[in-house]
Image (cartoon, coloured by chain):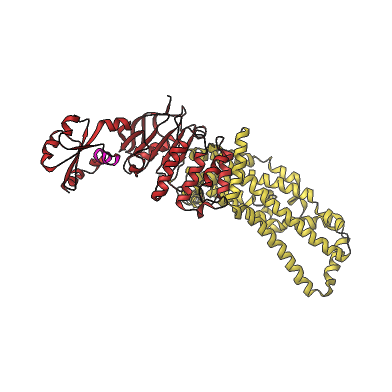
């Protein structure tokens, strides 16, 4: 990639934002507004039941007396949990976006305009991938950051009412620098982990004559059903290598930045709530050491090359 | 003059159907070439090959480049307007101009805005709210602001009213075209571009039926209008086409003996449309008989 391609990439990312402002800009901000409104609503309703707010303020004072480590777990844990809605919806939006990304302009024929510009097909495919892996996560993260600040401000107001120091009881335990940097890293690692799924969708989007999202689902679903039926009649079993199961597992474990390694093998009841789950650099970096991660990246590379190949030959339908 | 487009044995097959059947083509700089043919004759297939939008067999070089592998470089010097409304509908006019400016090294924003100022197109309008004609005007403004050497127009004025169409071609001719550039245009509205073409190509079933300059065409073909009593004499001279209009027989000759022909009636230059019917008309068997019977 030379500077010209990077400049192209930059303007093509802006193009994606221009095309889908609702999905990429207003949805994350809307969820933030929803979370903040819901919080305020709960607090207002709570104030009506809790005369003079005595119970609330008492609880806050108790909270202020807790040891720092516990407060840290509660505040940062709550903040992380508040962003789950953002993170889950983001994956959904990215999946649908990718499935349409190399298809919509073929359908409405605007591909004839895009192809009349001196931009390589490789750069175009990369711009779609960068939108999914970098731009959308960045925009959602920005909305998460706003939500965190708003929730902390609301918390501070309550802390002051309860007469405890908001700085030491809320802002410091929130450990924002660590929470945010792990979250940013987590989003990047998550994108890398989901890369084969993203690349598969781009690949389907590059050639599907219609309904790319259905085709992208139907092919692995069909293969996995066929394999399953064959196992049933033949006694030949490789359940670990069922393509549908592999894709679902990867999607499922990749939904939250920190969830890649949550092992539910022992059952949910054995899951211990601690910082390792959502706020540890070593957990996030640990994913980079897994062979599955790099096998996935390799698979993604193959699909991306194929997507560029199809894009090069694509015209209007 | 170096050739802008050079094709040898250019072919494209869809299964057994030959959309392009081994075409040879040379288009030098400074020409306005009309590529005319009935629906499904291979016009769009040829244009797509030239623009690097589809694969092909044979040799093809556009501005010295191979369109199939070098589309992105080629598009710095080639502009392209497909039939109307391929600009992305979600975009605003300003965004499209921004995009083109950032992505096209030879685009001049100032010139584009100058062309747009003469239209009713507002910069913050969305493309989907513009009329068909306005979208074409916008596309033309974008394209005219690009220093390109080849402009390809595929049915650019489809579905537009006659005022738009006239203005479109006069803008193109007066403000864009010069001797370093070439324009390749396909259209069904032949009579409108007749007077601006320098070269004429007829394509039928994937083959070139005619490929010559307008001067040659005019020197080569002659149309003769004769009274009923001279019809047999006119037929004897071997016309390539015959039709009847208001009781007068009209014959088209390829390289006629002018003195001989002139003696039989009034001699005209045939219009492209008449030439088209004469050369392509036998696509439907019996069509010419029907016509002369009418």
Residue A12: percent from the left, percent from the top? Answer: 59, 43
Assess whether residue B273 is covered by the magenta stretch. Answer: yes
Residue A278: percent from the left, percent from the top? Answer: 73, 51
Residue A190: percent from the left, percent from the top? Answer: 66, 46
Q: Vertical placement of B253 versus A223: above or below?
A: above
Relative to residue B294, is residue A133 drawn left or right? right
**Rendered residue at 64%/39% (across/down):** A291
**Colour given to chain A in the rendered image:** yellow
Tell which chain the image draws in red.
B
Looking at the picture, tell me which residue is in the foreground, A81 or B100.
B100
Relative to residue B256, is residue B55 drawn left or right? right
Task: Please indicate, yes or no, whether residue B153 appears anywhere in the rendered image.
Answer: yes
Looking at the picture, tell me which residue is in the foreground, A226 or A315.
A315
Relative to residue B58, is residue A19 drawn left or right? right
Q: Quadrant of residue B270?
A: top left
Assess whether residue B294 is covered by the magenta stretch. Answer: no
Label tally = 0
Q: Quadrant of residue B38?
A: top left
Main secondary-structure element of the magenta-colored stretch: helix
Residue A153: percent from the left, percent from the top? Answer: 79, 59
What quarter of the picture does the N terminus of chain B occupy? top left
Task: Please indicate, yes or no, whether residue A194 appears anywhere in the rendered image.
Answer: no
**In this picture, which residue range is highlighted in magenta?**
B272-279
């Amino acid at each position: 990639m030379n500077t010209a391609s990077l400049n192209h990439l930059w303007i093509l990312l802006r193009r994606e934002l221009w095309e889908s402002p609702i999905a990429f800009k207003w949805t994350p901000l809307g969820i933030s507004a929803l979370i903040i409104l819901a919080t305020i609503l709960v607090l207002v309703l709570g104030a009506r039941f809790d005369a003079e707010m005595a119970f609330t303020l008492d609880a806050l004072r108790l909270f202020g007396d807790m040891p720092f480590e516990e407060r840290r777990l509660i505040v940062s844990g709550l903040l992380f949990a508040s962003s789950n809605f953002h993170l889950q919806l983001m994956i959904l939006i990215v999946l649908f976006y990718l499935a349409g990304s190399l298809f919509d302009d073929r359908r409405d024929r605007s591909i004839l305009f895009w192809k009349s510009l001196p931009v390589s097909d490789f750069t175009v495919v990369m711009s779609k991938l960068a939108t999914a892996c970098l731009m959308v996560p960045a925009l959602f993260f920005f909305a998460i950051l706003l939500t965190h600040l708003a929730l902390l401000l609301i918390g501070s107001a309550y802390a002051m009412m309860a007469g405890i120091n908001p700085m030491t009881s809320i802002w410091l335990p929130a450990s924002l620098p660590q929470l945010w940097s792990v979250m940013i890293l987590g989003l990047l690692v998550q994108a890398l982990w989901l890369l084969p799924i993203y690349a598969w969708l781009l690949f389907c989007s590059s050639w599907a004559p219609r309904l790319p999202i259905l085709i992208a689902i139907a092919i692995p679903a069909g293969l996995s059903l066929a394999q399953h039926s064959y196992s049933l009649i033949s006694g030949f079993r490789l359940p670990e290598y069922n393509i549908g199961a592999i894709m679902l597992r990867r999607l499922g474990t990749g939904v939250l930045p920190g969830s890649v390694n949550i092992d539910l093998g022992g059952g949910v009841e054995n899951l211990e709530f601690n910082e390792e789950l959502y706020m540890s650099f070593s957990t996030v970096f640990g994913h980079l050491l897994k062979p599955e991660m790099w096998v996935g990246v390799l698979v993604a590379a193959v699909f991306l090359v194929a997507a560029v190949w199809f894009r090069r030959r694509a015209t209007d339908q | 003059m170096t050739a802008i487009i050079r094709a040898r044995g250019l072919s494209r097959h869809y299964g057994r159907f030959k959309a392009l059947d081994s075409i040879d083509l040379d288009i030098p700089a400074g020409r306005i070439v009309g590529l005319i043919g009935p629906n499904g004759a291979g016009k769009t297939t040829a244009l797509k090959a030239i623009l690097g939008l589809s694969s092909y067999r044979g040799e093809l070089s556009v501005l010295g480049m191979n369109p199939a592998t070098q589309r992105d470089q080629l598009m710095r010097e080639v502009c392209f307007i497909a039939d109307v409304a391929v600009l992305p509908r979600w975009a605003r006019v300003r965004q499209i101009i921004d995009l083109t400016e950032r992505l096209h090294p030879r685009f001049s924003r100032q010139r584009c805005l100058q062309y747009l100022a003469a239209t009713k197109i507002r910069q913050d309008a969305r493309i989907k709210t513009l009329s068909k004609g306005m979208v074409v005007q916008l596309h033309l403004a974008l394209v005219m602001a690009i220093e390109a050497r080849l402009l390809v127009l595929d049915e650019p004025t489809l579905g537009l009213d006659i005022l738009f169409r006239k203005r479109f071609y006069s803008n193109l001719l007066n403000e864009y075209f010069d001797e370093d550039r070439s324009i390749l245009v396909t259209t069904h509205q032949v009579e409108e571009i007749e007077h601006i073409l320098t070269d004429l190509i007829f394509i039928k079933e994937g083959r070139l039926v005619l490929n010559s300059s307008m001067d040659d065409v005019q020197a080569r073909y002659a149309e003769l209008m004769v009274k009923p009593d001279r019809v047999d004499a006119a037929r004897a001279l071997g016309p390539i086409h015959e039709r009847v209009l208001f009781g007068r027989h009209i014959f088209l000759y390829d390289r006629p003996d002018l003195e001989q022909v002139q003696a039989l009636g009034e001699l005209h230059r045939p219009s492209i449309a008449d030439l088209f019917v004469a050369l392509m008309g036998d696509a439907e068997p019996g069509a010419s008989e029907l016509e002369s019977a009418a």
